[in-house]
Image (tube, rainbow, N blue to C red):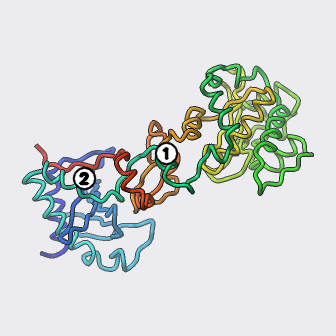
Amino acid sequence: MKFEEAIYNCVKILKDYDYNISGTDRIWDLIFPDNKSQWHHLKVVYYNKIYYLYHIDGNNCPLEVSPGKGVQVTDSFGGSSYKDGSDDPSRVWGPIVTSAVSWLKKVKKNWIKANRQVQEQYPLNRRYGVVQNSLIKASFSDFYKLDKDLGKTDSRRFIRLVEEGYFHKDKNFIRENMTAKEYFDYCRIAYIAGKRKDDHVDVNLSGREMYKRYADGRHEGLLDINEDSYQEFADWIDGKHAKKTSDGHPWEIKRGGNTTHIDLSVFRPHFSRKEGFVIELRGGSLGRLKETIKMFLAIYDASLPISISDPEGIRMRLLAQDNIGIIPCYESLHRANQYFKEDKHVYDVIYYDDLGIYKRRITPFISWEPLPLLKPID
């Protein structure tokens, strides 16, 4: 059978199996072994009369399939190469399509037995899961430990504030009024407290001067208003001041990437009511959280209202009660924690193979995400 005909036959058979939908797309996930017992995960998406085939856990080029009209390589963000079969899709896709058709027939014969085989045999290093950080911390001496980096005293102080309900009392982080100068004074405390070994912070500068030197720079007019005026700061916050601009990063007091900077933000407690100001630190990335906590504690020690984003999550991280995400070997670690839902409390991720000699110890504690089931339409 020609390559094109084999693919047409595959997607034709696939119509007889349950699918998920996303918008108007129909989506099938096929996980199956080939004739060499090598496992593959294909995602097939049907949109606007075209089938798109993606080799999720492999390197094959994605395909566009228009039944009866043609098969072609679709655009790939990673570019194309001889290895992915872009020069001759049949070379890499032919054997996989043949194995997929064989698997579909097996599923049709006994879909429960076939799916059980997937659950039992699909490699663990290609799955998503979570495991409590305390197990990783107890196993790997060189794994980053936030509490150790922050120090016992500051760790215990922060945990105590969370447990005593500090963040549930508005008076602890809401001010009735504020000026730009008072905001810059907050910044000065933060810069000095959060100073890292490789930072140069001139302690002789005023808060305004520090903000001007060390912040992102796109201040949206904050440096242009009367710094001693309560009304001008309020108007600037509410977007009514003539010097208020947009598309800046006025709260980014320490520069970084999209997820690796530190914000000291000010906002209204209630969107519909122009009363009061919440002052909140945000810097939850693995490499910036210690600084952010140091800033928070210093501002707290100055008896100024202050909050910090996700305080209960930070407590979990200090006690290693958060989860470490396990991601498939073919995924990038970059921002991979964002794959997991917020209630999973995943702030850091690793590959399953990174567990090394501790796989046997830790694997029983991993909660794996369910693999997709494939079954014939009833």
Q: Residue at x 64, y 46 (%)?
A: 148
Q: In the rendered image, is residue 56 in sight?
A: yes
Q: Residue at x 33, y 70 (%)?
A: 60
Identity of the amino acid at label 1?
Asn
Tell me the residue that label 1 is attached to: 133
Q: Is residue 69 visible?
A: no
Residue 280 shown left or right of residue 192 in the figure: left
Question: Residue 271's x, y, as percent?
Answer: 62, 25
* Front-lying residue, 138 or 86: 138
Mark 1 surroundings within 10 Å by alpha-carbon count, few (fewer than 14), some (14 through 19), many (20 or more):
many
Secondary structure, mark 1, is helix
Quadrant containing the N terminus in the rendered view: bottom left
* Amino acid at the residue labelled 2: Trp
* Residue at 76 percent of width and 28 percent of height: 235
**Disc sitting over residue 246 in the figure:** none
Judge left or right: residue 170 versus residue 374.
Answer: right
Q: Earlier in the sequence, mark 2 or mark 1?
A: 2
* Tag shown at residue 28: 2
Image-quadrant location for residue 360: bottom left
Q: Position of residue 110 (x, y in %)?
A: 9, 51
Residue 353 on image: x %, y %: 41, 61
* Image location of residue 109, percent across then percent down: 7, 54
Q: Which type of secondary structure does the marked residue at label 2 adopt?
A: strand
Classed neighbour count for the residue bearing mark 2: other residues with Cα under 10 Å, few (<14), some (14–19), many (≥20) = many
